[in-house]
Image: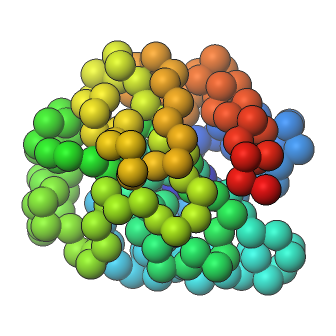
Amino acid sequence: MVIPGLATGDISTTLLRRTLRMRGFEPEGWRQGMNTGGHPEKLDKLEHRVAQLHRQTGHKPIVIGWSLGGLYARVLAHRAADDIAMVITVGTPFSGDRHANHGWRVYEALNDHTVDNPPFAEDFSVKPPIPTIAIWSAVDGIVAPDSSRGDKDEADITIQIDTQHFAMAASHTAIDRLIAAIGETDSLFA
């Protein structure tokens, strides 16, 4: 399952999902329109969908969250750990000062809460109880590298892919690196 970033929807992750499909995965979009921020009802729908996918296929899905979508993925992994194989965050500000990122003003303009007071009880920086990969970029331009890399105890593996934020889910190079990371780490968590 691929969850899009702030002010984007499934269209923004089309290339990523198409490439995943060509590599043998069965990717799903989040199917909830534009991702405008933290909404408990959207998280509830995602939780229901991952459980449904697990039951239907017999396999736990990998959840990939780009930017804000990665915050959803991390919270989802805390709530539905038994139904998710792995969480991959891509340019996601899950660690440290949320004001160190350039998107916080847009987020707050679209929501009735601040970036420091999201409508979820879970702490984004606490590593979920399942395998977690954090993909980050030193040249992101939107999300601070320290925020998307996290501290050493906040993700199992961190992978640096130096590309701009909006290319992380939309460039062939970044997508190829992301897919390679799934393959390389799959054996580590087996």
Q: Which residue is drawn at 79% across and 46% down?
A: 187
Q: In which quarter of the image is the N terminus?
A: bottom right
Q: Quarter-wise, where is residue 19 in the image?
A: top right
Report whether residue 86 is seen.
yes
| As drawn, 86 above or below 77 | above
Residue 179 pos. (x, y %): 71, 34
Q: Residue at x 46, y 73 (%)?
A: 78
Q: Residue at x 16, y 57 (%)?
A: 115
Question: Which residue is nearer to you in this view: 128 or 14?
Answer: 128
Residue 2 pos. (x, y %): 60, 52
| As drawn, 178 above or below 127 | above
Residue 35 pos. (x, y %): 39, 56
Question: Which residue is nearer to you in this view: 76 or 154?
Answer: 154
**162 displayed left or right of 150:** right
**28 displayed left or right of 126:** right
Q: Residue at x 46, y 17 (%)?
A: 162
Q: How many marks?
A: 0
**173 displayed left or right of 25:** left
Question: Which residue is nearer to you in this view: 62 or 132?
Answer: 132
| As drawn, 29 above or below 138 | below
Q: In which quarter of the image is the C terminus?
A: bottom right
Question: Which residue is nearer to you in this view: 3 or 120?
Answer: 120
Q: Quarter-wise, where is residue 22 in the image?
A: top right
Question: What scheme was used to colour the molecule?
Answer: rainbow
Report whether residue 179 is seen.
no
Residue 6 pos. (x, y %): 34, 48
